[in-house]
């Protein structure tokens, strides 16, 4: 494997010396790196497809619902509405935990 890495490195250095990397599109601009380090390798392609289609994975949809319900519970003054929203939050929390556990 090291021989292959050395060969690739020498080819890259030769191309750089000949100016083959000059004037490439995006030259001088920062790279747009995607942080997929927290996504398991076997799920990365699927997540990328979902992201490109503007869809969220189910566990992120559930987490988004949890984030939406928190401020609603805090803002409501009606005890019945607060209880209803709290039940919805508990259901969303359980759904999120199940989805996360299913991914493991």
Image (cartoon, rainbow, N blue to C red):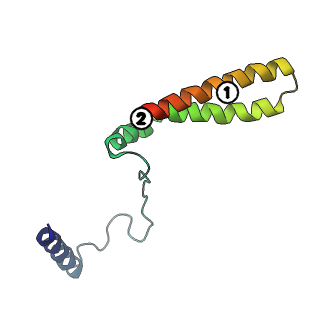
Examine the rendered structure and indicate whether residue 23 appears above or below residue 68: below
**Res. 64 image quadrant:** top right
Look at 45% across and 66% down and name the residue there. Answer: 30
Which quarter of the image is occupied by the N terminus?
A: bottom left
Residue 74: numbered disc: none
Task: Locate residue 35: give its quadrant.
Answer: bottom left
Residue indicated by mark 2: 103
Can residue 56 be seen in the rendering of this structure?
A: no
In x, y percent, where is residue 15?
A: 19, 75
Residue 38, percent across and down?
Answer: 44, 50
Q: Which residue in the protein does label 1 denote?
A: 89
| Up-down relation of residue 42 to residue 6 (above or below) | above
Query: For the residue carrying disc 1, how many other residues have a C-alpha within 10 Å: few (<14), some (14-19), or many (20+)?
Result: many
Q: Residue at x 72, y 34 (%)?
A: 70
Q: Circle 2 — which element?
A: helix
* Most foreground residue, 99 or 65: 99
Residue that sits furthest to the bottom in the current view: 17
Q: Residue at x 70, y 30 (%)?
A: 69
Distance of label 2 from label 1 (alpha carbons): 21 Å
């Amino acid at each position: 494997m090291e021989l292959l890495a050395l060969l690739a490195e020498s080819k890259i250095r030769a191309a750089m010396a000949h100016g083959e990397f000059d004037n490439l599109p995006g030259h001088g601009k920062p790279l747009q790196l995607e942080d997929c380090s927290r996504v398991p390798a076997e799920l990365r392609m699927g997540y990328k497809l979902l992201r490109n289609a503007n869809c969220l994975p189910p566990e992120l949809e559930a987490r988004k619902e949890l984030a939406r319900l928190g401020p609603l519970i805090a803002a409501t003054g009606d005890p019945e509405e607060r209880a209803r929203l709290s039940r919805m939050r508990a259901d969303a929390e359980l759904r999120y935990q199940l989805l996360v556990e299913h991914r493991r």
